[in-house]
Image (cartoon, rainbow, N blue to C red):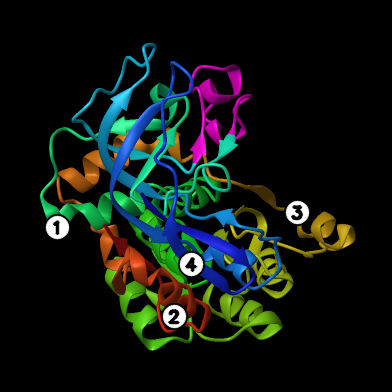
Amino acid sequence: MRGVVMYTAGDVRVEEREDPKIIEPTDAIVKLTATCICGSDLWPYRGIEPADHTLMGHEYVGLVEEVGAAVKTVKPGDFVVGSFVISDNTCEICQAGFQSKCVHAEFVHAGIGTQAEKARIPLADGTLVATPGQPDPELIPALLAASDVLGTGWFAAVAAQAGPGKTVAVVGDGAVGLMAVLAAKQLGAERIIAMSRHPEREKLARYYGATDIVGERGEEGIAKIKELTNGLGAHSVIEAVGTQESFMQAVGATRGGGHLGYVGVNYDVSIPGIELFFAGIHTLGGPAPVRRFLPDLIQLIWDREIDPGKVFDLTLPLDQAAEGYKAMDERRATKVLLTL
């Protein structure tokens, strides 16, 4: 089969890889229908994370081709959406709703890599969710978004306690930030402030429910949020970037007693303890437990109540994955869908 391999930073190739096989009785083999490139894939692409012949990709939808003897909840022929973190969905931590910290958690990259024609998914019962039937082709991008960016944006909004009567500020206008806007709207937020200075992303943020757009960054961004909220800051703030500036902007934009949900993968972010101490805010974040939300998100998509698939603004065949990485790195694309 063909699959994406990152040899080293900036060197992305599509080459023949060995077809996956059932190893454990809890495995499933999925023939992928679509996959995509994540903003977090740009960390190794830019040399911030190590890459050495790394199998890329962790977002995926497709048809179950084969299952191990112990798999009970999915069967060959089912169309499935999978989380980007493997989980058993039965341990105490999973049952508490944090499947991304499952005792058997494993990230779907490196050893699996779903930017490929097929993938072996361990712990299939706890990781994969079957759709109600075979989806119409136009639903596939939306279902693919549920595998990571929608679930991550949704977790961020839940962590920030977005809801009725709340003002929500979203720091970051990438795919996850846009999905957080969608989630905040669905959760009933009264006002949603999207921080963006990119016209196409601003337009999509408005489509998903943003009521205000703020282009300022850093201290100016904090001041603008406070100006829009009677000097108090937002009730709920979502950090969806992962840089020093974006994180501190998110902390500063959260009102006293408010909630900050952070899902931007961050490197070299240093939070001054004294600033966090005197901020007096609630914080929750990290890798999103997408599996917790998948059944509900799939149903919302299936019923056509939400369309997260609009976040994909460039579609390429798998063989052109290198161009997809380049387009996202250069911010010519928000999120790239790869067809198979």
Label 2, residues with CA under 10 Å away: few <14, some 14-19, many ≥20: some
Q: What residue is rendered at 74% in x and 71% in y?
A: 244
The residue mark sitting in front, 1 or 3, is 1
User: Helix, strand or loop at disc 3?
Assistant: loop
Q: Secondary structure at mark 1?
A: helix
Q: Which amino acid, mark 4? A: Arg
On the image, numbered disc 1 is attached to which residue? 138
**234 is higher (above) or lower (below) than 205:** above
Quick one: 166 or 264, which is closer to the camera? 264
Q: Earlier in the sequence, mark 1 or mark 3?
A: 1
Q: Name which of mark 4 and mark 2 comes first in the sequence.
A: 4
Front label number (1 vs 2): 2
Residue range (magenta): 85-105
Residue density around tag 1, few if under 14, some if 14–19, many if 20 or more, within 10 Å: few
Disc 4 to disc 2: CB gap under 8 Å: no
Residue type of the residue flagged with mark 3: Gly
**Cα–Cα gap, marks 1 and 2:** 23 Å
